[in-house]
Image: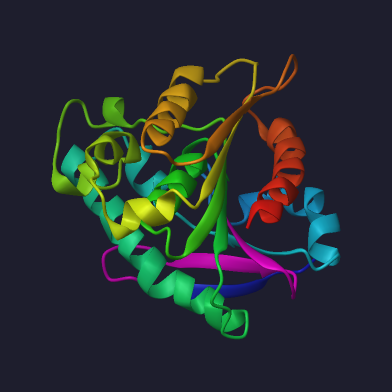
C-alpha cells in the first residue's frame, strides 16, 4: 500500500514535518509516532498492514504524521523550556496546518477525526483530543507515556502546563472545551509485559473520569509487551469500537 506524502517546513523546527496518507475513503485517523520515530514507522513496523482490512474496506483513511517527540521529549540535553516550547509550536501546527489539510484531502469533511498513538504517540493522541475536541471525536492511546514531569525535572511553564492534560484538566472549569470533551471518548490500551508504565495510564484515566470525560482502560494479558506486536493487535481491535460511538 503506497502512501501519498505531504511536507511542511515550519520556521520553528530545523527539519521538515511530514505526513503520509493511506487509503481513499473512510473516517480520518491521525496516527502519532513513538518516541524516536517518524511518520514512516507506522509502515516500517507493520501497523499499516495490520490496519489494511479497515483501510481497504473504506472504513478508515490513515494519516501517519511526524511529531516532535524525537526533537523535544527524547533529547536529554535540551533545556526543559525548549522541550515544552517545541511541543506548543507543534500543537499550533497540528490545528493550523495539519487538520485543515486533512479536511481538504477528505473533500471538505467537517466531522470528527480520530487520534491514535503508542508510547509517546499515545501522549500526543491524548493531548490532541483534550485540547481540540472540536476536531477530534475519539482517541486511542496504547502503552502511553502520559506524564512527562520527569523529562522536565521540576520545571514549570505555560507551554508545558497547557500541553499536559493530567495537569490542566483537573483545573478546567465549565467551558465549551469541557462540554465538548464530555461528548468524546478515549480508549487506553495497556499491556502486561516489560517496560509498561501502568501508573501513567491509570492516572490519566482517573483525571478524565473525574471531569466526566468517557474513557476505558483495557488491560491485555501475558505476552502483551510494550512493543509493536501488541500495538498491531490493539489498534485494529479498538478503532471499530470507537467509530461505532461517533
Tell me which corner region of the image, top left, top right, bottom left or bottom right, holds residue 237. Answer: top right
Q: Residue at x 36, y 37 (%)?
A: 211
Q: Pick the residue in front: 206 or 195.
A: 206
Q: Residue 238 in the image: state x and y as whole percent.
A: 70, 43
Residue 127 versus residue 133 in the image, above or below: above
- On whether residue 235 falls in the magenta region, the answer is no
Identify the magenta region.
9-31
Q: How is the image coloured?
A: rainbow
Query: Relative to 217, is 75 on the left or the right?
Result: left
Q: Residue 40 in the image: state x and y as whole percent.
A: 62, 56
Q: Pick the residue in front: 244 or 1.
A: 244
Query: Relative to 225, is 98 on the left or the right?
Result: left
Q: Residue at x 41, y 45 (%)?
A: 69
Q: Residue at x 26, y 65 (%)?
A: 12
**Residue 35 visible in the picture:** no
Q: Assign the N terminus to one quadrant of the image.
A: bottom right
**Residue 209 visible in the picture:** yes
- On whether residue 11 falls in the magenta region, the answer is yes
Q: Residue 20 in the image: state x and y as whole percent.
A: 62, 67
Q: Assign the C terminus to one quadrant of the image.
A: bottom right
Tell me which corner region of the image, top left, top right, bottom left or bottom right, holds residue 5. Answer: bottom right
Q: Residue 224 in the image: state x and y as whole percent.
A: 71, 22
Residue 201 versus residue 241 in the image, above or below: above
Tag count: 0
Residue 71 versus residue 195 in the image, above or below: below
Q: Residue at x 77, y 64 (%)?
A: 59
Tell me which corner region of the image, top left, top right, bottom left or bottom right, holds residue 61. Answer: bottom right
Amino acid at each position: 500500500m503506497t502512501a501519498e506524502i505531504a511536507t511542511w517546513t515550519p520556521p520553528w523546527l530545523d527539519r521538515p514535518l511530514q505526513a503520509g496518507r493511506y487509503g481513499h475513503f473512510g473516517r480520518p485517523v491521525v496516527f502519532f509516532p513513538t518516541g524516536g520515530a517518524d511518520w514512516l514507522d507506522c509502515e516500517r513496523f507493520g501497523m499499516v498492514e495490520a490496519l489494511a482490512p479497515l483501510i481497504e474496506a473504506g472504513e478508515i483513511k490513515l494519516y501517519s504524521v511526524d511529531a516532535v517527540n524525537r526533537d523535544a521529549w527524547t533529547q536529554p540535553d535540551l533545556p526543559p523550556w525548549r522541550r515544552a516550547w517545541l511541543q506548543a509550536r507543534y500543537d499550533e501546527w497540528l490545528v493550523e496546518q495539519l487538520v485543515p489539510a486533512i479536511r481538504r484531502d477528505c473533500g471538505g469533511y467537517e466531522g470528527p477525526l480520530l487520534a491514535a498513538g503508542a508510547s509517546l504517540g499515545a501522549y500526543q493522541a491524548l493531548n490532541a483530543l483534550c485540547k481540540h475536541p472540536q476536531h477530534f471525536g475519539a482517541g486511542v492511546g496504547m502503552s502511553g507515556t502520559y506524564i512527562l514531569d520527569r523529562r522536565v525535572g521540576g520545571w514549570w511553564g505555560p507551554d508545558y502546563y497547557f500541553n499536559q492534560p493530567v495537569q490542566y484538566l483537573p483545573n478546567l472549569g465549565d467551558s465549551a472545551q469541557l462540554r465538548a470533551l464530555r461528548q468524546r471518548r478515549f480508549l487506553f490500551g495497556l499491556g502486561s509485559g516489560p517496560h509498561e508504565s501502568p501508573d501513567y495510564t491509570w492516572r490519566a484515566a482517573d483525571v478524565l473520569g473525574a471531569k466526566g470525560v468517557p474513557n476505558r482502560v483495557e488491560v491485555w494479558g501475558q505476552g502483551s509487551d510494550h512493543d509493536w506486536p501488541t500495538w498491531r493487535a490493539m489498534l485494529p481491535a479498538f478503532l471499530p469500537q470507537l467509530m461505532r460511538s461517533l
